[in-house]
Amino acid sequence: MRKSIQIQGMTLALALAAAMPAAASGRFVAGRMLARSDGAVAAGHVAGFRGPRGAAGIHGRRTVADGQGNAATASAGAWRGPNGGVAARSGETTRASDGSWQHQSGLAAAGPNGGSVTSHGSASGNGQGSASFDRQTQASGARGNYDGTTTGASGQGVTHATQATGANGITYQGQTTVGKNGVSHTGSCTNASGQAVACP
């Protein structure tokens, strides 16, 4: 559910970035903070710019706290380069009064020549010293495609898995794990017909 909302938000931000009209150069910043006597606070700001060659960007952040140890902050932004590339990022972090926390974030970008990259991940902790995280990243372009996943948890180390296919049709699959017992790695390559070949 959260991932779906996040991806939809990034898609919308990319669309907004692409649709920003080219206009005269300029910048704007706006912000506001509200505080109550019980310690609750809400603050936010938004900033944006337009460049002379079509570059544009907008970024905003909102933070709220209830004065009882619970807090949340979220941010999002979208940018467009002078050559037509667009990018967007969003993230959210929450903290509970018991010390537990959660974070999620993602980004998406597309270049003027058709290359693209997306990445999304999350992390959480129980406030007692245990935490875990995961992140997935995909990229594609004229040189091939990449798909990577990184996961980790307290006491279990970190594992990164990769699948990459080059423009020549050779696919590499590998996994690297870093733990308290050291580093382990496996990897192999296949050609476009699925036959095992030596890795470049």
Image (tube, grey):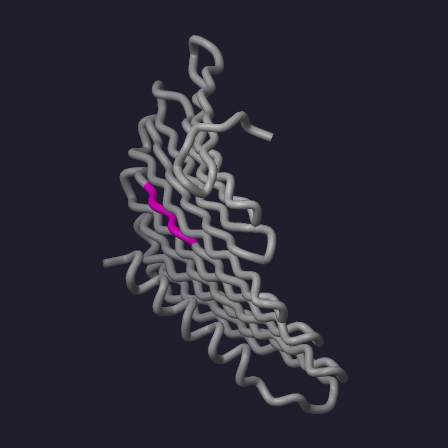
- Where is 110 relative to 171, above or below? below
* Quadrant (top left, top right, bottom left, bottom right) of the N terminus: bottom left
- Give the left or right position of residue 177, taking residue 142 as reference: left
- Rendered location of residue 65, percent (x, y): 37, 57
The quarter holding residue 186 reads top left
Q: Residue furthest left?
A: 1
Q: Measuring 55% from the left and 66% from the top, which residue is drawn there?
A: 110
Compared to residue 187, the image places residue 144 above or below, namely: below
- The residue lying toward the viewer, choosing from 60 and 177, is 177
Left or right, 70 with respect to 15, comes to: left
Q: Nearer the viewer, residue 136 or 171?
A: 171
Query: Which residue is depicted at the point 60% across and 30% down?
Result: 200
In this view, the residue in front, 127 or 9, is: 9
Magenta region: 101-105
Q: How far from the left and from the top, in percent, is residue 102?
A: 34, 45
Residue at 57% of width from left, 85% of height from top? 20
Image x and y of residue 61, in percent? 49, 66
Image point 33% across, 47% down: which residue? 69
Residue 82: x %, y % from top left: 71, 76
